[in-house]
Image (spheres, rainbow, N blue to C red):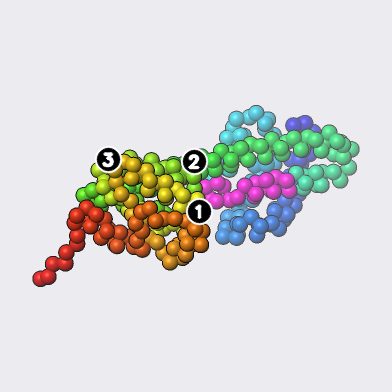
Amino acid sequence: MNPFISDIILEHKEEIMENWLVEIKKFRSDDLLQNISDSMYENTNREFVNKLIHSVQKEKEDEDFQDDLIQFSERLIQLGWPLNYITRGLQEFRKITVESLSDKGENYCKSIEFFQEIEDWTDDIVNLLVNQYSGSWENTVFLQKMALKELSAPLIPVFENISVMPLIGTIDTERARLIMENLLDGVIEHRSQVVLIDITGVPVVDTMVAHHIIQASEAVRLVGAKCILVGIRPEIAQTIVNLGIDLGKFPTKSTLKKGIESALEMTKRQIIEIKE
């Protein structure tokens, strides 16, 4: 940054800081920060603006300065502060800086070069912090996705030759592929003769979901096992009928308990009540 601009910003830093702190409070309610205490919000704002003010003394390639900003942004991410706080805060800071300095009687502070210098300075900081936020969120989403995959659609053996696959949450094409893979691998591994697919935890069964379930049952049949669909709630049954979906190729039961009873009968077993 031009040394003259650095000096004049540092000379008027108190004015710039106070004006910025007043303006940034105006959009606190828009940034989902209502749960942040007043003292934390105030202290974080002051720390943020202090870092911005003192950055004029650093070169944009300065690794210590970049590391300092990155650590600050990582702390905000961990505390749940939105990216909007960073971007709006920097936009407001740029506006406040220009407005505060343009009336100081210095001709250079009214020139295009001055505006461009301030623009470039804040843009470099915006790019650094936005990239850090984006990278952090992408990494978080990736880890969550991998964790969901590991927990998604396990095939659980409950009796000899009988397994259950509980499905929870929305089923999309990617998850349907994973369900199919886990289902076929599990049938072979556990030597299952009957598989119960439990859709109690699936909020919506539409044409696509039903198609994936039918495909899964057909695949199970091809590897020598039978499939029972359980967890058919009344609203799900009505939706299936209204959509004209044919689930007649394999048995359906309203509860997992009834499904297990049917599976035991299919494997020539039954539950017998023992009287004392």
Q: Is residue 151 above or below residue 64?
A: below
N-terminal-most mark, 1 or 2? 2
Identify the residue position indicated by label 2 in the image: 142
- What's the residue at 66%, 37% (across, down)? 127
Q: Which mark is residue 72?
A: none
Question: Is residue 113 rendered to the left or right of residue 131?
Answer: right
Cα separation between marks 2 and 3: 29 Å
- What's the residue at 69%, 41% (across, down)? 53
Q: Is residue 32 magenta?
A: no
- What's the residue at 73%, 54% (across, down)? 23
> Amino acid under label 2?
Phe
Q: Position of residue 276 (x, y in %)?
A: 10, 71
Q: Which mark is residue 207?
A: 1
Q: Position of residue 96 (x, y in %)?
A: 77, 48
Q: Is residue 257 above or below residue 179?
A: below
Question: Is residue 202 rendered to the left or right of residue 112?
Answer: left
Q: Residues within 10 Å of mark 2 (few under 14, many from 20)?
A: few
Q: Quadrant of the N terminus?
A: top right
> Amino acid under label 3?
Glu
